[in-house]
């Protein structure tokens, strides 16, 4: 892609950018198609599309390079809004479907998107920011842990046979966020 970290703009998505967000999500998550056999991959793609077009997200945040969306993340305010799972008891901000286009990876875009979501969570008065992920997303897990996300075992869930692990970030203790390193 050739753009620098400083030239990446993080902003709210416009209403007419949902298709572009879906394209980034599909290209970013396509690497898991071989791990999720046949119907499971198609179910996951459908879930991605439904999340992008649903009214549930509090914010659709995008990273833009030039005129092109190169990353996105959805911010929800509860587990009910994020997953239709009120029984998880999360009435705090949750990020879902963090994605960076394969051609734009390695530029810190995911960190910028998480930082923006975390800043918005702080503005809302939240103490924590939550997410769920699985072991198949090893590079994402590594990033989350590097940024200070901790396991939140009480919010783990099963999606078929896949353990989807809960994580949370204590916003006021995230030194990288407080220092403005996003």
Image (cartoon, rainbow, N blue to C red):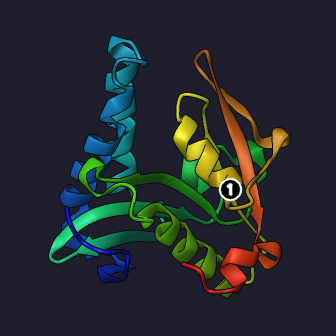
- Name which quarter of the figure residue 120 lies in: bottom right
119 in relation to 69, above or below: below
**Of 87 and 107, the residue lying toward us:** 107
Residue located farthest toward the left when viewing the structure as drawn:
67
- Name which quarter of the figure residue 90 lies in: bottom right
Question: Helix or strand or loop: what does disc 1 sit on?
Answer: helix
Q: Which residue is drawn at the image coordinates 68% and 56% (left, top)?
A: 146
Q: Quadrant of the N terminus?
A: bottom left
Report crowding for label 1: few under 14, some 14 to 19, many 20 or more residues within 10 A (C-alpha): few
Q: Which residue is drawn at the image coordinates 26% and 76% (left, top)?
A: 14
Q: Is residue 84 visible?
A: no
User: Residue 22: x percent and y percent?
Assistant: 26, 51
Q: Is residue 70 visible?
A: yes
User: Residue 15: x percent and y percent?
Assistant: 25, 72
Position of 15 with respect to 63 (left or right) is left
Q: Which residue is drawn at the image coordinates 30% and 75% (left, top)?
A: 4
138 in relation to 3, above or below: above
Q: Which residue is drawn at the image coordinates 73% and 56% (left, top)?
A: 149
User: Residue 106: x percent and y percent?
Assistant: 40, 57
Q: Quadrant of the C terminus?
A: bottom right
Q: Which residue is mark 1?
A: 146
Q: How many marks?
A: 1
User: Residue 133: x percent and y percent?
Assistant: 60, 40
């Amino acid at each position: 892609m050739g753009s620098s970290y400083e030239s990446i703009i993080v902003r709210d998505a416009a209403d007419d950018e949902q298709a572009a967000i879906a394209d980034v999500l599909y290209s970013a998550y396509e690497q898991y198609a071989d791990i999720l056999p046949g119907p499971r991959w198609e179910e996951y793609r459908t879930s991605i599309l439904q999340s992008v077009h649903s009214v549930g997200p509090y914010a659709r945040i995008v990273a833009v390079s030039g005129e092109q969306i190169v990353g996105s993340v959805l911010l929800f305010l509860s587990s009910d809004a994020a997953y239709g799972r009120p029984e998880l008891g999360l009435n705090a901000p949750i990020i879902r479907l963090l994605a960076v286009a394969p051609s734009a990876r390695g530029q810190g875009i995911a960190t910028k998107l998480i930082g923006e979501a975390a800043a918005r969570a702080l503005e809302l008065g939240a103490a924590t920011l939550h997410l769920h992920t699985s072991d198949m997303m090893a590079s994402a897990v590594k990033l989350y842990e590097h940024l200070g996300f901790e396991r939140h075992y009480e919010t783990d869930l099963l999606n078929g046979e896949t353990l989807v692990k809960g994580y949370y970030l204590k916003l006021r203790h995230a030194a990288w966020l407080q220092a403005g390193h996003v």
